Structures are given as C-alpha cells and as structure tokens.
Image (cartoon, rainbow, N blue to C red):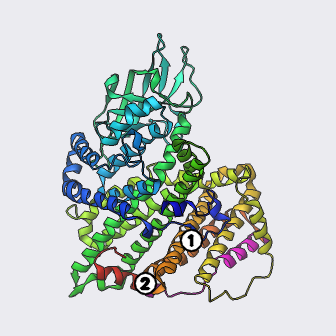
C-alpha cells in the first residue's frame, strides 16, 4: 500500500485551490492495511480496559500519579513509540499510521491529551531536531514510557505570539551550562514529566536577549524547577496542567536543541504536526459521542416510540455522521500527502528527520485547515450529542457532560481557530508571492469569466460525479474571485482585514473537505460499485451541498465588506454563478443516512 501511494501524483501544499486531484491519487481510510487496523484495535482495547472505566476517577483526582501509571501501560503496548525511529527504540511507522493511533486514542478524554502531549510536542522536537547523542539519550525512554515529557512554550504574556516570550537562558561563567529563568503556563503533563522541551531566549551577560527563541532539553533532576498546583479547568480535568517556574535551572550546553535561535522554527514546525494530529484526535472523540447518541436514541422512548424514529433526531444523527465522515476523509488525505512527500524527499537524499520536517512544512496549510475543521466538528457533535440526550445530556451522570466540556479546549489548543484561519490565508498568499503556487493566473482567468456569458452546457451524465466535480471547480473559482479582489483592493494592508481573511479561510476549508469526501466516495465506488457505497455517497452529497451554502455565505460576507457599486454587483453575480447547485432533497438523504446507523446501533459503515 505504501508503495502504491508513493507512486501517486504529488501535489504541493495549498495547491488544491488551483489544481484538481484524481480519486486514484488520494488515500482513503478504507485502504488501511491489516497491520494498521490491528494497531487501531490495540488502541480501542486499551481504552476499553484501562481508560473508560476510570474516567470519573481521572477527572476527580487530577492525579499525576494515575495519569503517569496509565502512560506506563500505554508504553508497554508500544503506543508511545509509534513515531519514534526504530533505531531509538520506537516503531518508525508512517505518518498516517501515527494519525490513526491518535484518532483511536482520541476517544480517551483527559488521557488522550496527556498521551498526545507526550508523543507529539514532547517527543518529536528531539526526533526531528535532536543530534545523535540527544536522540540516543532521550528517545528510548520516551518511546517506552520510562520517561514522560512536557512542552514548555506558552507564557503569561506569550501565547499566539510565541516569539515574544520573556524566559531567558544565560551562559554560566564556566561555559558549561545555560542558566534558565522564567515562567511557563498551561503546561500539559507538567506535574509528572521527567523531560521538558523548554523555549527561552539566550541573553548575554548584559541581559541583551536574542531576537528569536532557542530550545533546550531540560531534565527535572537538574533542579531549579518549581510548579503550582494543577489548574482548575472547564474540561479535560484529569489532564495535569500547571504553571512551571525555572529559577536558575542549570542545563548542560549540550542540551541546546538544534541551533541557537532556531527555537521559533522548531515551535512552528512542531505545531504543524500538533494541528493535524489534533484533527485526528477530535475524530476519535466525535465518533465516541456519535455512537453514544445513536444508542441512546434507540433506547429512549417518548410517546411510546424510540426517539430515533423522529425526524428531528434523525437530522441530528445524520449531520453528526456526515461531518465526521467528511473530516476523516480530509484528514487522512492530508496525512498520506505528507507521507508521499516524505518518501519523495528521502529518495532525493534527505535524512528521515529532514524529509518529515520539510513535508510537514509543505502541508502546513492543510494542517491548519484540519485543525480548525476537526475541532469544530467535534464541538458540533458534542453539542448535538447533549441535545439528543435531552435532560440527561445535562446530567453529570451521563457521558455527554464530559464530552461537551472536554471538546471545548480543542478550538484553543495548537493555536486558536482564529489564528489558524488567519495563517491559512497568510501562508497561501505568501507562497503565491514567492511563485510557489500560481494563484494570480487562475484568479485573473476567473475575473474575466464572470464578465463572460455563463456556460449553460449540460454536464457529461455518463461520467460518475461529473456534476459534483463541476461544483467543486466552481467553488474554487469563488475563492479565487474573492481572494484575488481582496488582494487587489488592500494589497499589503490585507493582513489588517481579519474578518475578510477569515471569510476566505472558511471558503477554503469547506472546499478542501468537500473535495476530499467526494474523492473518497469516487474511489470507493470505483472499487466496490455504486450500490455498495450508497450511504457514503449520500453523506458526500449532503456535505457538498452544505459546503456550497457555506461558501456562498462567507463569500457574500467578504465581498460586501470591501466592494461597492458596479464591482459589488459583478462579484455578487459571479458568486451566485459559482455557488449554483441543482436542488436536492437533503431531508431524504439525511433520513437514509440516519436510518443506516440507527439500524446498526453505531457509527459503522
């Protein structure tokens, strides 16, 4: 499978806006190998045996000892070493395999946060940026769980603006160590971590600090580390989150991670990974919520019948399923694109770490897109899960209480969704300015097209999904029209127009996900036949038609924010043309989707 996918046509990050992908060239979750599915089953079994029975205990205690002991058990199963290279005690599995593990463990509430913090931001900086001595010293323990890790970036006055941190590192008089002083906050796993990835600016003897952060591997045994009690949080109450203080913490000079001043780049690249992994974790949480909602709807009786028979409940269950299916399609499409590019870079002579970093940097736009989409799908599903449960949804004795509270942090983790929306457009435009993506050519073509006579030709009815593919192409034109006009209008001051940027980002997010789910069902239909994947096709259609409405809404919001007179009328006319869709009975499709899962009593395809 890996070999077949490596042969697929590569596409650059962000190019989905201007290029059409073929179904044969994307990865779909139905293509996971038996080995990958066995790993996923191991994750499911672990949650069922060790985590779910102890959720109340985890939340009530907030005990670092309990979380640490469960991490030990996860380490014994190999769940902590999936992304660590084999030569350092891990399994060295593909990026999409690590995504699958993250998804399945994502249903573990507070525990999944601890696990992801350890395996992701707590371990990967050493995997990707550590020198040979650092990798050999730290990675085996991190892969086995013998050592636990935490990531110390955020400060009281340094959140999204990470490079403004005030923590300082000064070289000792004997030149053998850096002395770190500063405060970090919201540090996951802080109470039981043995190893900290700490970001600080190196300062000279006069106190003048570098412009950019540096990163350090800090062991708890070095001393000079104190911490507050665990934070009291709205959700993920079992996750050990603390403020940590470094007071004359002496760190050996050989524990400088990468080069001096390279910390900000490390932070940004590791956050790219964290963003798409968060989308995968959100999937796991959303599927768990939907399963509970379906089962409750089947069991709960009102007016003498199961509430699953009511159209209003069917609407909710179908919408939850559609959003999950679509987000899953896009997440693993992006994950395999990253894997494919890693293979290309390695074949060209890059080391494993270099190839992974370069590939993740290339698909930073998709990582940001998926972070936003995955976290908002989970929020939607959790909210509707409460509603399906009705009064019991508000009870702390039912599962929706924890799901609702725990879901909310994901729109803040790994950069707020607002920051990620802004980054999506910013990165896209910067790549266009550098000539890495040709946006202006297609944008100019679209601007001419909206002044031309519309194309009233019928589509090729003999080609599967021809009409839907045309809809996707038109939605991309809508993005190009709006973004192109906004760039022309504001030029370098566009960054100050955050509302418009976020509208454009929402258009891009919906198009990427809608295209991904359509490509998935097209590939499935080619493999199994249309009749065998009827439910999947219905879910793709529902998502696509809803995406059209969202693109139209966001596009109108953006256009009316900066256009006027003739330009306004022409652009609104163009938007109407590009978001035109023949009427479809969405109610019937949703009922068909809901009935399928109600009959199975689970989200099972």
Q: Which range is magenta?
A: 566-590
Can you tell which quarter of the image residue 183 is in? top left
* Magenta-drawn stretch, dominant element (helix, strand or loop): helix
Residue 350 in the image, given as x and y percentages of width and height: 58, 43
Q: Residue under label 1, please give it.
A: 24
Q: Residue at x 42, y 51 (%)?
A: 93
Position of 288 with respect to 490 (left or right) is left
Position of 283 with respect to 523 (left or right) is left
Looking at the rendering, in which quadrant would you find the C terminus? bottom left
Residue 467 in the image, given as x and y percentages of width and height: 62, 83
Residues 582 and 175: in front is 175
Residue 84 in the image, given as x and y percentages of width and height: 41, 44
Q: Are marks 1 and 2 in contact (CB under 8 Å)?
A: no
Which comes sooner in the sequence, label 1 or label 2? 1
Does 86 sit above or below residue 595? above
> Is residue 581 on the magenta stretch?
yes
Count up the numbered dots: 2
| Label 1 crowd (10 A; few <14 / some 14-19 / many >=20) | some
Residues 282 and 42: in front is 42
Residue 131 in the image, given as x and y percentages of width and height: 49, 31
> Is residue 559 on the magenta stretch?
no
Q: Residue under label 2, please give it.
A: 532
Can you tell which quarter of the image residue 50 is in? bottom left
Helix, strand or loop under label 2: helix
Position of 59 with respect to 502 (left or right) is left
Residues 516 and 153: in front is 516
């Amino acid at each position: 499978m890996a070999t077949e996918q490596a042969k697929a046509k590569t596409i650059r990050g962000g190019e989905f806006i201007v290029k059409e992908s073929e179904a044969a060239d994307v990865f779909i979750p139905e293509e996971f190998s038996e080995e990958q599915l066995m790993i996923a089953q191991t994750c499911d079994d672990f949650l069922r045996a060790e985590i779910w029975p102890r959720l109340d205990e985890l939340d009530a205690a907030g005990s670092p000892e309990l979380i640490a002991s469960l991490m030990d058990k996860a380490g014994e199963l190999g769940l902590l070493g999936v992304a660590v290279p084999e030569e350092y005690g891990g399994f060295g599995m593909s990026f999409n395999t690590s995504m699958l593990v993250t998804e399945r463990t994502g249903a573990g509430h507070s525990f999944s946060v601890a696990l992801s913090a350890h395996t992701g931001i707590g371990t990967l900086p050493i995997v990707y940026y550590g020198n040979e001595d650092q990798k050999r010293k730290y990675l085996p323990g991190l892969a086995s769980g013998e050592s636990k890790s935490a990531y110390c970036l955020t400060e009281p006055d340094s959140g999204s603006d990470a490079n403004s941190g005030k923590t300082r590192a000064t070289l000792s008089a004997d030149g053998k160590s850096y002395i770190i002083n500063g405060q970090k906050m919201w540090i996951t796993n802080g109470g039981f971590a043995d190893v900290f990835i700490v970001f600080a600016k190196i300062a000279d003897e006069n106190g003048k600090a570098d412009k950019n952060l540096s990163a350090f591997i800090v062991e708890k045994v070095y001393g000079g580390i104190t911490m507050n009690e665990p934070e009291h949080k709205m959700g993920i109450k079992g996750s050990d989150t603390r403020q940590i203080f470094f007071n004359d913490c002496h760190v050996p000079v050989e524990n400088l991670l990468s080069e001096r001043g390279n910390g900000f780049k490390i932070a940004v690249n590791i956050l790219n990974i964290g963003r798409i992994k968060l989308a995968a974790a959100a999937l796991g949480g959303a599927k768990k919520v939907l399963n509970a909602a379906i089962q409750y709807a089947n069991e709960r009786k009102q007016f003498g019948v199961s509430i699953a028979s009511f159209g209003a409940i069917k609407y909710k269950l179908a919408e939850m399923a559609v959003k999950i299916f679509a987000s899953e399609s896009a997440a693993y499409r992006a994950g395999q694109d990253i894997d494919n590019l890693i293979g290309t870079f390695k074949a060209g002579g890059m080391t494993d770490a270099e190839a992974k970093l370069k590939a993740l940097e290339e698909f930073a736009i998709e990582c940001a897109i998926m972070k936003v989409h995955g976290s908002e799908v989970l929020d939607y599903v959790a909210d509707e899960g409460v509603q399906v449960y009705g009064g019991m949804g508000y009870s702390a004795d039912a599962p929706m209480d924890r799901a609702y509270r725990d879901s909310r942090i994901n729109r803040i983790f790994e950069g707020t969704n607002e920051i990620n929306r802004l980054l999506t457009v910013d990165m896209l435009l910067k790549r266009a300015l550098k000539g890495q993506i040709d946006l202006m050519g297609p944008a100019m073509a679209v601007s001419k097209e909206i002044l031309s006579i519309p194309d009233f030709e019928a589509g090729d009815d003999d080609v599967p999904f021809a009409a839907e593919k045309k809809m996707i192409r038109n939605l991309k034109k809508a993005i190009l029209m709006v973004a192109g006009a906004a760039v022309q209008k504001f030029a370098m001051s566009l960054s100050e127009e955050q509302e418009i940027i976020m509208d454009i980002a929402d258009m891009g997010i919906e198009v990427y996900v809608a295209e991904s789910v359509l490509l998935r069902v097209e590939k499935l239909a080619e493999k199994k036949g249309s009749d065998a994947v009827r439910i999947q096709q219905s879910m793709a259609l529902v998502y696509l038609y809803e995406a059209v409405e969202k693109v139209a809404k966001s596009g109108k919001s953006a256009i009316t924010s900066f256009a006027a007179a003739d330009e306004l009328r022409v652009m609104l006319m163009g938007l109407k043309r590009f978001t035109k869709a023949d009427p479809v009975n969405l109610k019937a499709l949703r009922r068909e989707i809901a009935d399928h899962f109600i009959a199975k009593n689970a989200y099972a395809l």
